[in-house]
Image (tube, rainbow, N blue to C red):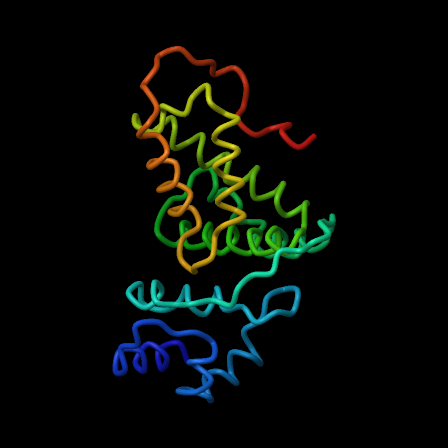
Amino acid sequence: MIQNLDELLARQEPRTFSSSWILKHAPHCYRFIRKYVRTDWGAVDWDRVTHALKPRFQSRWVPQRIRHSSAPYRNHAEVLLVLEKYRPKLYVFLAPQDAADRNFRDLISIALVRLAQCGNISAKQEIMKLVGYTIEDWMDGYRFLSRWRGREAEVRANLERCVRRYRYTGSFLTYVRRTLICAARGIRPTQVYSLNEPLFDGYFK
C-alpha cells in the first residue's frame, strides 16, 4: 500500500500533500490506512505512513494542525503502551547499532512526542529522559556539540521547544540535533564544565 502511494506521488509530483489529498487521489489507500494503520491509542498513525515513504516525499507532507491540550494530564498507561511495544529496543537511545535501530528510535520518539503534544505530562517526561541520553552521547562524540556542556538548562529548554514545535514526519532526533547545532553557533567553546551530574536524571522528580 505504501508502495502504491509512493508511485502515485512520483507520477503526480504534488508540491505538498495531506490526508485530504490521499482521500481524493487514492481513496483505496486512504480507506486502508484509516482501517489498519492506527496508533496504540486509536488515532490514525499518519506519522507511520509518511515515515515509510521515500524521503523526498516526506518533506512534502502537510499534517493536520496539532491541537495542544488546554488541560495537561498525567497518563502513564498511554506511555506504557509505547514502551512495552518497543521494550527490547529502548537501548537505541543509548547505543543504536545501525539504520534499523535509528528507525526504531524515530518510531518511539515520535509516538511519545505526539502524546506529549496532546498534553500528557508523563509522555513529556519520558521523551525528555530518553532523548537526553542521546544528547549526552552527542556531546561526548561531537566536539561542536560539546559546547553545550555546562549549559544543561539551555539544552533542556531547547529540547522542550522541539517537543512542542515538532510537526513534520521525519526523524525527531535529526530535528533536535539540527536545532542544537544551530543554537550552538553562538556559544563560545569552553573547557570548564562538570561531568559529575547527569543531564536529565532527576529533572522532573
Identity of the residue furthest to the top in this view: 192
Rendered location of residue 29, percent (x, y): 45, 84
Rendered location of residue 167, percent (x, y): 47, 57
What is the quadrant of residue 35 in the picture? bottom right
Q: Is residue 47 above or below residue 30?
A: above
In this image, 52 relative to 83: left or right? left
> Residue at left 47%, top 13%?
194
In this image, 130 relative to 142: left or right? right
In this image, 197 relative to 119: left or right? left
What is the total number of numbered labels drawn onto the structure image?
Answer: 0
> Residue at left 52%, top 85%?
31
Tell which of 144 and 48 is nearer to you. Answer: 144
Rendered location of residue 183, percent (x, y): 37, 34
What is the quadrant of residue 81 in the picture? bottom right
Tell which of 127 and 119 is nearer to you. Answer: 119
Tell which of 96 and 191 is nearer to you. Answer: 191
Q: Is residue 91 above or below residue 19?
A: above
> Residue at left 38%, top 32%?
138
Tell which of 168 and 91 is nearer to you. Answer: 168
> Residue at left 68%, top 45%?
122
Which part of the image, by quadrant, shows the C terminus? Answer: top right
Which part of the image, by quadrant, shows the N terminus? Answer: bottom left
